[in-house]
Image (cartoon, rainbow, N blue to C red):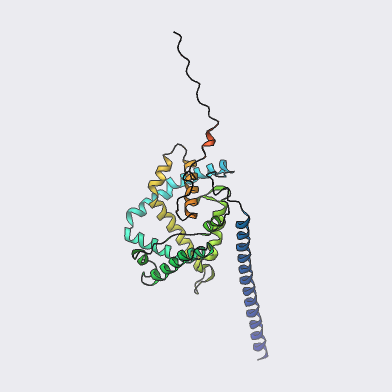
């Protein structure tokens, strides 16, 4: 009996120790997240908006970026492109739309948080309403009932939130397989993970968030690639596809930060033609000798 009681006490102490450690790490993670968020907003308050207001793109790693861009193009032509084409041909449009709606609805908590952080109460209310309607009447988001009722959706991420408060985009770079990005948007993606409820909740299923995020990433990559096939072909037909992609991505992100509102400067997203000042006009032809 004494041995049994001793073992029971030992198990209880071990369980309490594990619970204390788990609580400590959860608390530590939350403190780290809060500190990161506060630091980023301090950056937003101190940052200059010069980069955001001009069409100049800071690309200090252009040589490396071009090599990675070439690698991504090779992988896309050999694997991703054909898979996306096959997916679009074999999966019926209603099924593709349903899956797209489901994952869009799952991203609503992240969008809502960024709406709030950008001090946009009306858009936050719209996001919350869409989430409630589509999660219930729309059968977990498979059907965009809210959209058909006139409540259109929108997208927000923490990269846009940083840009909204004046944090410049930082260095542009191309990531292997993931494509174009910049320092601000990459930081935003990491923070957005913390806004995902599945990051903190497992519902009793081990590694649920890992499985869900992996499935979401693969599906959205293939689905987006299939939908953007024409745009990708257009970029490839440009004299400088790398430059076209860089300008297109940066212009799209600037537009997203403005919620699609046209800039007061209608030439804001055009390239800086001062880059061509080094080219001199050809000399005028001399008059022929009479």
Question: How many discs appear?
Answer: 0
The residue lying toward the viewer, choosing from 59 and 121, is: 121
The residue lying toward the viewer, choosing from 202 and 155, is: 155
Q: Is residue 84 above or below residue 149?
A: above
> For residue 20, what is the image quadrant?
bottom right
Task: Give how far across and how far down residue 165 sits, in percent.
Answer: 56, 57
Q: Is residue 76 above or below residue 91?
A: above
**Residue at horizontal 40%, vertical 55%?**
223
Visible residue check, residue 107: no
> For residue 123, what is the image quadrant?
bottom left
The residue lying toward the viewer, choosing from 60 and 9, is: 60
Task: Give how far across and how far down residue 30 sits, in percent.
Answer: 61, 69
**Residue at horizontal 47%, vertical 42%?**
244
Residue 14 left/right relative to 51: right
**Residue at horizontal 61%, vertical 68%?**
29
Task: Give how far across and how far down residue 272 sits, in percent.
Answer: 52, 39
Residue 232 left/right relative to 171: left
Visible residue check, residue 275: yes
Task: Give how far across and how far down residue 3 sits, in percent.
Answer: 67, 88
């Amino acid at each position: 009996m004494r041995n049994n009681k001793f073992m029971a006490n030992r198990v209880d102490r071990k369980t309490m120790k594990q619970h204390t450690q788990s609580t400590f790490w959860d608390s530590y993670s939350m403190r780290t997240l809060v500190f990161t968020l506060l630091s980023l907003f301090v950056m937003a308050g101190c940052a200059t908006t010069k980069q955001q207001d001009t069409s100049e793109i800071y690309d200090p790693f252009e040589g490396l970026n071009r090599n990675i861009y070439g690698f991504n193009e090779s992988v896309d032509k050999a694997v991703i492109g054909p898979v996306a084409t096959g997916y679009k041909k074999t999966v019926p449009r209603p099924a593709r739309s349903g899956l797209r709606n489901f994952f869009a609805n799952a991203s609503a908590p992240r969008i809502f948080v960024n709406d709030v952080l950008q001090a946009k109460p009306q858009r936050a209310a719209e996001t919350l309403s869409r989430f409630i309607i589509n999660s219930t009447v729309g059968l977990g988001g498979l059907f965009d009932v809210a959209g058909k009722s006139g409540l259109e959706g929108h997208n927000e991420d923490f990269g846009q939130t940083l840009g909204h408060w004046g944090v410049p985009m930082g260095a542009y770079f191309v990531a292997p397989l993931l494509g174009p990005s910049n320092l601000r948007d990459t930081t935003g993606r990491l923070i957005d993970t913390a806004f995902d409820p599945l990051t903190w909740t497992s519902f009793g299923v081990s590694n649920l968030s890992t499985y869900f995020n992996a499935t979401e990433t693969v599906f959205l990559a293939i689905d987006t690639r299939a939908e953007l096939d024409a745009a990708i072909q257009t970029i490839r037909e440009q004299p400088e596809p790398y430059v076209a992609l860089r300008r297109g991505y940066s212009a799209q992100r600037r537009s997203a930060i403005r919620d699609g509102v046209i800039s007061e400067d209608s030439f804001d997203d055009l390239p800086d033609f001062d880059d061509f000042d080094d080219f001199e006009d050809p000399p005028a032809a001399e008059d022929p000798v009479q």
